[in-house]
Amino acid sequence: MYLSGYSFTWDGTMNTGYYGYPPEEGGNIAPAGLYTFDVEVEANPYDRDAVRSKALTVVPGPVEYLGYDDGGTPEDESDDNYLYYLRWYALYSGRDASWGEIWLYDPDLERVQGWGVPMLACVVHGGNDGLVANPNGEVHGVVIPVPVSAMEKAGTYTFVLHFYDDYADSYKNHQVKAALEVNRETPPQAAWVWIGGLNGSDLQSKVDWQYVGDSLLWVCRYCFTWEVGGGLTAGEVDSVTLGTWTGVQTPQ
């Protein structure tokens, strides 16, 4: 017998039921976040099924902030993108994935953007082959252009990898199945400030840090954080020299 559908509501509890160690009341509520799930049913060893694909496995790698793209129009922010580098992900299957998407969720766990994987160039192979899989794992990497308008909230954003297998011919309903989704969060970013000619206590007494903080307010507004760091040298990648900034030096 084939059941077309079943719905249920998760109450947020964890480690209950047949695990044998019921936790204290209220102590087993999962923290807020994005969760994926699978449901398996078995009538007998020869008649079993699951919501998620067992034929396709997705393994994610780290996400890194790559830079800012102004779209060649510095005066127009509407076409600007933050560039995030999904350094690698691997697809394990005997067949290529039939489709794949990458979804972006904001700090409030709302989906704000999505990309079709075939539309993203694979930096590993140099083509749009991000659906290719093999039993030993096919590794891909993509650069994801995120519109500035999609990341207006401060906090952590999450990329979710959503792929479908290509085994519709082996399922009772003759439809492809989604693999278990996996995700990676955006890393914290820092706007490093470099000031030449000052060391030790002079960094605290001769720099108007309130002015620096006010100047970098827009950075914090776009999900970055800034802090005073040590050990930077002139020419450090992404460092900023403040010598020409009016008001940085405090009155002597």
Image (cartoon, rainbow, N blue to C red):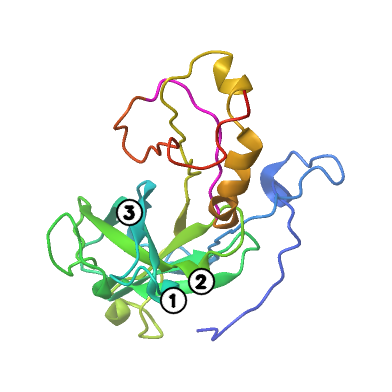
Crowding at mark 2 (Cα within 10 Å: few <14, some 14-19, many 20+): some
Q: Amino acid at mark 2?
A: Ser
The label nearer to you, 1 versus 3, is 1
At numbered mark 2, what does the secondary structure look like: helix, strand or loop?
helix
Q: Residue 155 location in percent, x, y?
A: 60, 53
- Note whether 205 is above or below 241 in the view shown: above
Is residue 189 or residue 88 the one in the foreground?
189
Of labels 2 and 3, earlier in sequence is: 3
* Residue 102 visible in the displayed image: yes
Q: Residue furthest right?
A: 25
Is residue 142 or residue 226 the one in the foreground?
226
Of labels 2 and 1, earlier in sequence is: 1
The label nearer to you, 2 versus 1, is 1
Instruction: Say whether residue 228 is magenta.
Output: yes
Question: Which disc number belongs to residue 149?
Answer: 2
Q: Are marks 1 and 3 in contact (CB under 8 Å)?
A: no
Residue 236 appears left or right of 182: left
Residue shown at 61% from the left, 30% from the top: 250
Crowding at mark 3 (Cα within 10 Å: few <14, some 14-19, many 20+): many
Residue 36 appears left or right of 23: left
Of labels 1 and 3, earlier in sequence is: 1
Which stretch is magenta? 223-232
Question: Which disc number belongs to residue 106?
Answer: none
Q: Amino acid at mark 3?
A: Tyr
Question: Which disc number belongs to residue 85?
Answer: 3
Q: Residue 21 location in percent, x, y?
A: 75, 38
Mark 1 to mark 3 CA distance (whole Å) = 21 Å
Question: Which disc number belongs to residue 78?
Answer: 1
| Residue 32 picture quarter | bottom right
At numbered mark 3, what does the secondary structure look like: helix, strand or loop?
strand
Q: Residue furthest left?
A: 126
